[in-house]
């Protein structure tokens, strides 16, 4: 268990991942390695005009023993914290406290897993995927199901598709709830596709009870969790969730 501690984090780079999502790369100002487990999050202390507020962000990069870590922040309309982070200029420093969280996956875990995410909920799963691929052994079956409204909202798409092309055990599936007429892929909410993908994953991996990792806003997370535990009969300990609201 890694203990959370306060530290100063400096913004060293930022780039848009979509119209609403900005990736922020921070470094510990003291140059120490930022130790965390794939799937964990940090609290950022934001100096807003009305006073300090804390906001939690999942770590999008894999642990690697470096001072650097990436976050991806969705700009919420009227959301003071996320709007502040979308304006933050490289070079700025913030107080951070972390890492926190039990939504983790051991990179050496050989269990097949279905990762279900909407929006920036994909970030801790990206960290887990990179950590597993970097663990120096044959990667287990890791399948991502990403839900978004429109194709342009799908973040880390090129990167995750490249990983999927490089391994027959990695799969990246997208479903769009408002895909345009040219969209030839899956449609609807993630929950519409979870049963089929879960059963396919069980068959492909030869493991009757793959794990399910679910991250995003509460409504989606609760729906998929109930589906997994109920209709799909996934053992309780194999269902892992992280909620953003
Ligand atoms: C453990 C944990 C990890 C989190 N990780 C991330 C992350 O990696 N990226 C991220 O963008 N947010 C993440 N969040 C949410 C984040 O902490 C803030 O709640 C969010 O940035 C909104 O803060 P705000 O001050 O802008 O708006 P507020 O005024 O505080 O919130 C307004 C509303 O925004 C909604 N909201 C919160 N998060 C999101 C979101 N990601 N997408 C759409 N609507 C949202 C909620 O329904 C909330 O009621 C995480 C939250 C938790 C608890």
Image (cartoon, grey):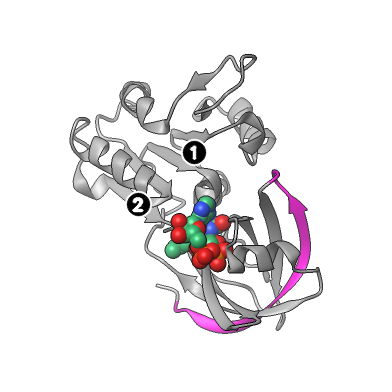
> Residue at (76%, 59%) from the top-left corner?
14
User: What is the number of callouts on the image?
Assistant: 2
Stretch in magenta: 3-19
Query: Is 12 colored magenta in this rendering?
Result: yes
Name the chief secondary structure element in magenta. strand
Q: Quadrant of the N terminus?
A: bottom left
Residue 11 located left or right of residue 98? right
Q: Quadrant of the C terminus?
A: bottom left
Where does residue 230 sit, x and y in percent of width and height?
Answer: 18, 36
Q: Which mark is residue 139?
A: 1
Residue 9 located left or right of residue 216? right
Say above or below: 215 vs 85: above
> Residue at (49%, 38%) from the top-left corner?
139
Distance between the alpha carbons at the discs numbered 2 and 1: 22 Å
Q: Earlier in the sequence, mark 2 or mark 1?
A: 1
Q: Residues within 10 Å of mark 2 (few under 14, many from 20)?
A: some
Which residue in the protein does label 2 denote?
Answer: 241
**What is the secondary structure assignment of the residue under circle 1?**
loop
């Amino acid at each position: 268990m890694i203990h959370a501690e306060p530290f100063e984090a400096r913004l060293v780079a930022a780039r848009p991942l979509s119209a609403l999502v900005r990736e922020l790369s921070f470094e510990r100002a003291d140059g120490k390695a930022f130790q965390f487990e794939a799937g964990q999050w940090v609290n950022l202390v934001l100096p807003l005009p009305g006073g300090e507020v804390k906001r939690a962000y999942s770590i999008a990069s894999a642990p690697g023993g470096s001072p650097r870590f990436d976050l991806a922040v969705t700009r919420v309309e009227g959301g003071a914290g996320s709007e502040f982070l979308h304006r933050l200029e490289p070079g700025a420093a913030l107080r951070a406290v972390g890492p926190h969280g039990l939504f983790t996956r051991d990179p050496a875990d050989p269990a097949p897993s279905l990762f279900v995410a909407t929006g920036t909920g994909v970030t801790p799963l990206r960290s887990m995927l990179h950590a597993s691929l970097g663990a120096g052994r044959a990667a287990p079956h890791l399948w991502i199901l990403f839900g978004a409204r429109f194709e342009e909202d799908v973040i880390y798409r090129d990167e995750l598709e490249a990983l999927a092309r490089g391994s027959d055990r990695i799969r990246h599936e997208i479903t769009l709830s408002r895909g345009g007429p040219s969209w030839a892929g899956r449609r609807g909410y993630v929950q519409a596709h979870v049963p089929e993908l879960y059963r396919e994953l069980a068959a492909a991996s030869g493991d009757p009870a793959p794990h399910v990792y679910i991250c995003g806003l509460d409504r989606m997370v609760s729906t998929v969790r109930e589906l997994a535990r109920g209709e799909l009969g996934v053992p309780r300990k194999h269902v892992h969730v992280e909620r953003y609201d």
